[in-house]
Amino acid sequence: MSFEEYAALARQLSEQRRAGEQHAATESARRRDLHAAVDYLQQRLTAQGQRLDQLGRAIGIDQPAPAPPPTGAGSGDGEPAGAAGAPGRAGVGAYPQLPAGEARLALPTAVSPAGGVVPTQRAAAADPAVELELARRMADEADRHGQQAELLAQRPALLPTWSPLARAVAVYAACGAAAGVLVLILVLASGVGLVDGFTLGAWICAGLPAVAFFAGYLVLGRWGRPAMVAGTPPRYLPLGFLICFLLVPMAYCAYLLLVRGLR
């Protein structure tokens, strides 16, 4: 071998070594990036799981429902559940034992269109980067749905798009209106002698307004509180007291004016 050939071979080997080192460095950096992406994704999934647990506790779901028993469970008398319950046992034809020679020949096969039998091809190995990208997209989608669920959980079941003040006014007014209907019933009962004047006045001035006020208070506490809001939202007690104790007597006054107007 001449000196020029030896030098060319040395240069070729050097280039191959540098290419191998560069490839190894690139592969090492790729693996580091993949491990970092896996760690970050794991942290995101852990945070999502914790947030889902908080949402579940907020809506009253502490533990997931028990999983159904696996298919082919035993009948309870000690016998195995089907052929899969005892592989390899005598009398059970689930996994027959083959001789060593036949076992080597018993490979998965598939029928070709021409009628021949060919070995089944193995599935191609998945690219970790592609799988991580798919997992990241799913995590983003889960974050989006989680934010939507949190927004819905921050709204009460009763009049969710209304402000707390408007909701309280509507609830107290509705309870006061219902009490006003009861006032009219008591007035009619008083007209036929079933209720005396003192009882009617007591219910109009104190009894029914108090009932309407506490009914509105309980309704706001039960259906006017968002699931994800800690504590009790404002119920505007002075405003509710004023509405109920004004609306009921006003209903009675309106009834009197109506009766006099019809006369």
Image: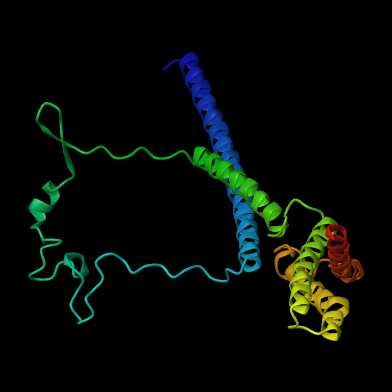
Residue 116 is left or right of residue 253, and the answer is left
Q: Position of residue 253 (x, y in %)?
A: 89, 66
| 184, 62: nearer the viewer | 184
Q: Residue drawn 64% across and 50% down? A: 40
Number of residue marks? 0
Q: Position of residue 93 (x, y in %)?
A: 10, 63
- Where the C terminus falls, by quadrant? bottom right
Instruction: Give the residue at the far front of this rendering.
Output: 263
Q: How is the image coloured?
A: rainbow
Dividing the picture into quadrants, the one containing residue 189 is bottom right
Dividing the picture into quadrants, the one containing residue 219 is bottom right
| 238, 53: nearer the viewer | 238
- Where the N terminus falls, by quadrant? top left
Residue 167 is left or right of residue 253, and the answer is left
Residue 32 visible, this angle = no
Q: Position of residue 236 (x, y in %)?
A: 88, 67
Query: Where is 95 relative to 218, above or below?
Result: above
Residue 192 is left or right of residue 29, and the answer is right
| 20, 29: nearer the viewer | 29
Residue 106 visible, this angle = yes
| 26, 191: nearer the viewer | 191
Dividing the picture into quadrants, the one containing residue 2 is top left
Q: Residue drawn 18% across and 78% down? A: 79
Query: Where is 78 relative to 108, above or below?
Result: below
